[in-house]
């Protein structure tokens, strides 16, 4: 997942901020229209939008950015269903990219998911080849 540069939005003018604050005062129900289609936001997204709108209603400047999830080697190993030692060895061999935060290894969740997909494809190919060998007289 590519990271998108942060977007900074200046605080709203006083009148707009006051009107938005009044609208948010007793409600956290957010309805989103995209090309005329109504979308109901999941709770997490709704909470983020309400928080963003509340900050704008207070006249605050807001910065929105995305963060790619970085996992510890233990978290990554658990997600992949392999041992911590095996995962560390794979990072040492360069099979899974790793980043360092000080002396601690961090692995992008997307890297683990890509490795798992590769493993799945290899298993399917091996199974397919095995079935072909069994089918030949």
Image (tube, helix red, strand yellow):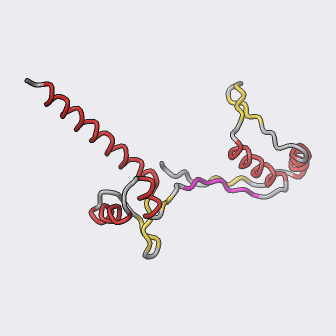
Direction from residue 51 to residue 134 in the image, left or right: left
- Which portion, as a residue range, is magenta? 61-67
Direction from residue 9 to residue 72 in the image, left or right: left
Tell me: residue 102, above or below residue 29: below
Q: Residue at x 73, y 43 (%)?
A: 46
For the C terminus, the image quarter is top left
Residue 32 or residue 6, whichever sits in front: 32
Q: Residue at x 56, y 53 (%)?
A: 5
Direction from residue 4 to residue 26 in the image, left or right: right
Q: Quadrant of residue 100?
A: bottom left
Q: Quadrant of residue 128?
A: top left
Q: Residue at x 71, y 43 (%)?
A: 43
Tell me: residue 134, above or below residue 14: above
Tell me: residue 56, above or below residue 120: below
Residue 24 locus on image (x, y percent): 86, 45
Q: Quadrant of residue 58?
A: bottom right
Residue 111 or residue 72, whichever sits in front: 72
Residue 21 locus on image (x, y percent): 88, 49
Q: Is residue 107 magenta?
A: no
Direction from residue 56 to residue 126 in the image, left or right: left
- How many marks the image carries: the answer is 0
Residue 13 locus on image (x, y percent): 85, 51
Q: Outermost residue, left direction?
A: 137
Residue 78 or residue 116, whichever sits in front: 78
Residue 133 locus on image (x, y percent): 13, 31
Q: Outermost residue, bottom direction?
A: 103
């Amino acid at each position: 997942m590519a990271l998108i540069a942060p977007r900074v939005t200046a605080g709203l003018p006083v009148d707009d901020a006051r009107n938005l604050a009044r609208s948010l005062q007793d409600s956290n129900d957010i309805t989103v229209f995209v090309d005329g289609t109504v979308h109901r936001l999941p709770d997490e997204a709704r909470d983020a939008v309400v928080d963003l709108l509340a900050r704008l209603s207070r006249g605050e400047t807001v910065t929105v950015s995305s963060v790619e999830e970085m996992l510890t080697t233990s978290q990554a190993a658990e997600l992949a269903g392999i041992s911590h030692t095996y995962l560390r060895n794979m990072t040492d061999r360069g099979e899974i990219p790793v980043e360092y935060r000080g002396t601690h290894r961090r692995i992008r969740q997307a890297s683990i998911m890509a490795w798992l997909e590769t493993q799945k494809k290899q298993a399917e190919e091996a199974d397919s080849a095995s079935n072909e060998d069994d089918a030949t007289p």
